[in-house]
Image (tube, coloured by chain):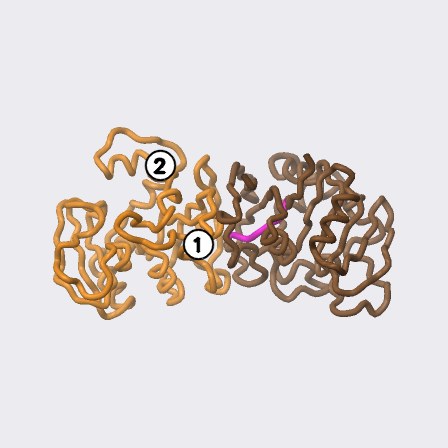
Chain colours: A brown, B orange
Amino acid sequence: MSKVKVAAFTVSLDGFGAGPRQNLQHPLGVRGEELHAWFVDTDVFKKMNEQSEGAHGIDNDFAAQSRDNVGAWILGRNMFGPVRGPWKDESWKGWWGENPPYHTPVFVLTHHARAPLTMDGGTTFYFVTDGIESALQKAKAAAKGKDVRIGGGVATIRQYLTAGQIDEIHLAMSPIFLGEGEHLFAGLNLHALGFTSIKTVASEKATHVLIKKG
Amino acid sequence: MSKVKVAAFTVSLDGFGAGPRQNLQHPLGVRGEELHAWFVDTDVFKKMNEQSEGAHGIDNDFAAQSRDNVGAWILGRNMFGPVRGPWKDESWKGWWGENPPYHTPVFVLTHHARAPLTMDGGTTFYFVTDGIESALQKAKAAAKGKDVRIGGGVATIRQYLTAGQIDEIHLAMSPIFLGEGEHLFAGLNLHALGFTSIKTVASEKATHVLIKKG
């Protein structure tokens, strides 16, 4: 069965999935980078960025699992870039350079139409202007039986949670307090939405929580 | 140096420290008991309740530490009982029976005066009507150089956090989503208040997080 999943999504102890005031210097918002300390040392991350061997162990296992069987991604527009409002031109091609770490079709939620953007390594960004359900249908079709991964950011995940469209979540809780930013859970009742935590595994750098609808 | 501390305080993955709708049947609010699964099996808890031997290990170590060097406690009134408004009589003597698990002076924050209540085992409840700073002064004096433990509930901890009076927090994060109830962090910026997570230790039933100011 193909699933719609969130994976390797990091939140702070106080529940923030990104820092405030995202911009070019802070793609994850202010202090957002600190959230991902567990991820950036992993061998999976290093290989994604064509760097030398990284760390193995619990964090790397979860990083690797998060990439298994993904046939398409969905991203909110702010996760694609810092541009707001209509596209002035087509010069912005994502945060990731010529070879983004997706290697599948990626559906970007936006209010502003733009032609598909084909990158190296099998990633094509499609810009979806007619809502989250449409993006999900397109992603499922493109995934050809594999899973659809909702990459984020926070607002996008919250919309799909509220719509009841997410089957499985792997959260990495990072041992920091952000204190401000984008809160993943505020005002959402994950219990009422049917989610249960089924497994918790801690490394030195994060507590990994597997959550399923059930 | 004597400290003001919160210890063995349990929150859900989504940050709730108690369930909603506290009453006689639900001293911790609806589903609040599920939060404390890590605690109720420990040897510390069993001994507190004069039951047979309980579990040892990580959870029990944290339960034991939480009781070290405590010279006085502060509790919010709702943690003392379900009675609201003026005391109708003095029949309510806490949730814990004749021998409460404090064995020190306990300062209960309330708007309604009441005579001190001496229980078995060294616990005396003092009812403080002139605010949190006054309660803290009284507790520090009563603790005679030992630590003051802010027992809860959520609203009481939040008041002392906001007032900058807490030095150290041990949270146990329980792997459940409550979805509603009393949120420990909402609207508080623990980072701006100077707190840093210094250690995370996971058992099968909870992730223990040690947080210090400074």
Q: Residue A33 carries which label?
A: none
Secondary structure mostly seen in the magenta stretch: strand
- The one of B114 and A176 positioned closer to us in this rendering: B114
- Which residue is depicted at the point 34% across and 31% down? B55
Q: Residue B180 carries which label?
A: 1
Please provide the residue range marked out in magenta: A8-13
- The image position of residue B57, as x and y in percent, is 39, 32
Question: Magenta stretch: residue A7 in it?
Answer: no
- The image position of residue B115, as x and y in percent, is 12, 62
The residue beneath circle 2 is B60
- The one of B51 and B91 positioned closer to us in this rendering: B91
Is residue B157 depicted above or below A7 in this figure?
below
Real-space Cα separation, disc 1 to disc 2, in angstroms: 28 Å
Does residue A66 appear anywhere in the picture?
yes
Give the residue type that dot 2 points to. Asn
- Pair 1/2: label in front: 1
Q: What element carries label 2?
A: helix
- The one of B124 and B184 positioned closer to us in this rendering: B184
- The image position of residue B85, as x and y in percent, is 23, 65
- Read off the chain for label 1: B
Dividing the picture into quadrants, the one containing residue A88 is: bottom right
Is B135 left, or right, of B58 in this rendering?
Answer: left
- Read off the chain for label 2: B
Dividing the picture into quadrants, the one containing residue A204 is: top right
Q: Is mark 1 on a helix, strand or loop?
A: loop
Give the residue type that dot 1 points to. Glu
Going from N to C along the chain, the mark reached first, 1 or 2, is 2
Is residue A213 depicted above or below A182 in this figure?
above
Question: Magenta stretch: residue A11 in it?
Answer: yes
Is residue B159 depicted above or below A2 in this figure?
below
- Which residue is depicted at the point 80% across and 47% down? A105
